[in-house]
Image (spheres, rainbow, N blue to C red):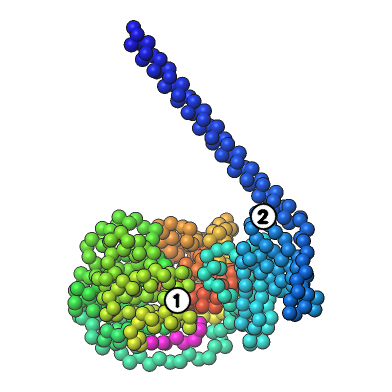
Amino acid sequence: MFRHSISQWTKYLTIWMLCVCEAYLGIFFIMQRTIKTRRISDSRTSGSESRNRKPSRRTVSTPSGRVSISVERRSSTRSVEGRFSKTSGQRSTTGNRSEGRYDRSGKGKSSFAGRRYNKSGGSSFGSSSSGSRGYKRSSQSVSGKPAWRKQRGSSGRASQRRGKQQTIDIAHFINQAVNAPKPKEHIIKHAFADFDFVPEIQENLRAIDFVSPTPIQDQSIPYILDGKDVVGLANTGTGKTGAFLLPLINKIALDRSQKALIIAPTRELAMQIDVEFRKFSRGMKIFSSLCIGGTPLYNQFKSLKNHPNVIIGTPGRLEDLQQRKAIRFEDFHSIVLDEVDRMLDMGFISNIRNILDQMPIRRQSLFFSATMPSSINKFVHEFLSDPITVEVSSGKTAHNVEQDIIRISDKEAKLEHLKVILAQPELEKVLIFSETKRGVESLSQTLYKAGFKVDSIHGDKRQAQRHKSLSRFRGSQINVLVATDVAARGLDIKDVTHVINYTIPQTYDDYVHRIGRTGRGTSKGTALTFV
């Protein structure tokens, strides 16, 4: 009986302790929420007080004269904002050092963020305080025509990545196909049958009716077959993919121990390269592994266990697999960087350096792109050994793309005008570019509700969704695709009749790649830009 009573008391005591613990936990969470709410309200109050607080004044003597300084201290951001006014002039400067904001426009206080540069001389500061994106007419450009300067907020990886802001002259968007000088004719010196390819490659080329190479293929393939490092520069749609794939496949066919690494900036471009590779290497028992983000790692691990001769991927996923011991960069004898300027522009420079540093010193390096800015030249020659530059670009933009602009005053008129344009019968397959993911999705939904066959592609979509959208567009199940610049590099989509820049691209190189989606090869195309 005594033991029975002890067990009952133990049971009651346990229940009581559990109740006490639960009560204490409840009190703890309530206190945490209260403290958080008070902090938010305090920060808002201190922010409003700091805005309403009158700044204290201070006079400082300088070699150029006496300067009256008005200093305001904000406790919420721990920043010091000062207004400097010289007695000898009207120029004023507002600085917020903690947030990196400066305004030297001479118009007093501003919340504009980030310094802007334009090529017409001088510098300007500004991006709307509300964070909205717009366009501002700047001073005369070098050509004497008005230039349009893109305004951007301080947020976003794109603005942090690009740094200096270009001024894009809208004259570049008008009738370039008509007014452009006649492109330089490149004489094709070889046929595919003249190249020292193995018989299997020649068979595959005949099966897909490839007889005569493009200029970039004609000039670069002999050097790659000789084992030289090559920098290939050519406009979009000129066959750069075949220029490096065919010699690499031939190299592996002659020596099965050879391995090649092909890196592309976007998943879509990597998938396209893989499709071309399978077409050229059909029946040769030379296999590839596609390693891109947004797809299951398990399938890629399984593919890599088969020891493929060629690995095609994006920089981030390749580094991830290397850290998981699934890839050894030391084993590769050849590397290809396709659209190298885009990769560095997207912030992959550290990833590329890490990969190249781990590869053997004696290797063959092939860099291909449509543009090669001088800022990237140093990086290219740092990792290539006596490279041969093959340039067959026929100008900044393709000569068979007719370009024009559409002037719109307000946002509503812009959308309505786009609907009118898309309703015209000659716009059979249209690619529309917008700058932000949210803008792309919103525009796509609006056009869908208006009755257009439209889909969207941007970085927030899963890889399966992006692949499905591209497949529907290629198969003409939809005739309008709204995209961010993720679709502007390297993708070969046949029969795109029109490219519409719903927002002005941030750089002229981006514009070149956008309109390069139409007028590919010998086809004609049209590019329209809203300004």
Q: Which residues are magenta?
A: 389-397
Q: Nearer the viewer, residue 105 or 289?
A: 105
Quarter occupied by the N terminus: top left
Seen at 59% across and 43% down, the residue is 36
Q: State which mark lies toward you, 1 or 2.
A: 2
- Residue 177 position in % (x across, y down): 54, 84
Question: What residue is pinned by disc 2?
Answer: 75
Which residue appears farthest toward the right when viewing the image? 87
Picture quarter containing residue 50?
A: bottom right
* Closest to the observer, 430 or 217: 217
- Going by the image, does 113 lie left or right of 468? right
Q: Residue at x 67, y 62 (%)?
A: 80
Q: Nearer the viewer, residue 185 or 65?
A: 65
Secondary structure under the numbered disc 1 in the rendered image: helix
Q: Check disc 2 and report its element: helix, strand or loop.
A: loop
Give the residue type that dot 1 points to: Asp
Residue 223 point in image, percent of width and height = 30, 87
Residue at (43% x, 60% y) in the render: 466
User: Which residue is under mark 1?
Assistant: 341
Q: Residues within 10 Å of mark 2 (few under 14, many from 20)?
A: few
Q: Amino acid at mark 2?
A: Ser
The residue at the point 48 percent across, 58 percent down is 460
Mark found first going from the N terminus, 1 or 2: 2
Where in the figure is residue 207, as x and y percent of width and height? 27, 76
Is residue 24 shown to the viewer in this render?
yes
Image: 331 above or below 31: below
- Give the main secondary structure, helix, strand or loop, of the magenta stretch: loop
Instruction: Count numbered badges in the picture.
Output: 2
Asked if the residue at tag 2 contacts the one at tag 1, i.e. Cβ–Cβ closer than 8 Å, the answer is no
Mark 1–mark 2 Cα distance, whole angstroms, equals 43 Å
Establish if 517 lies above or below 459.
below
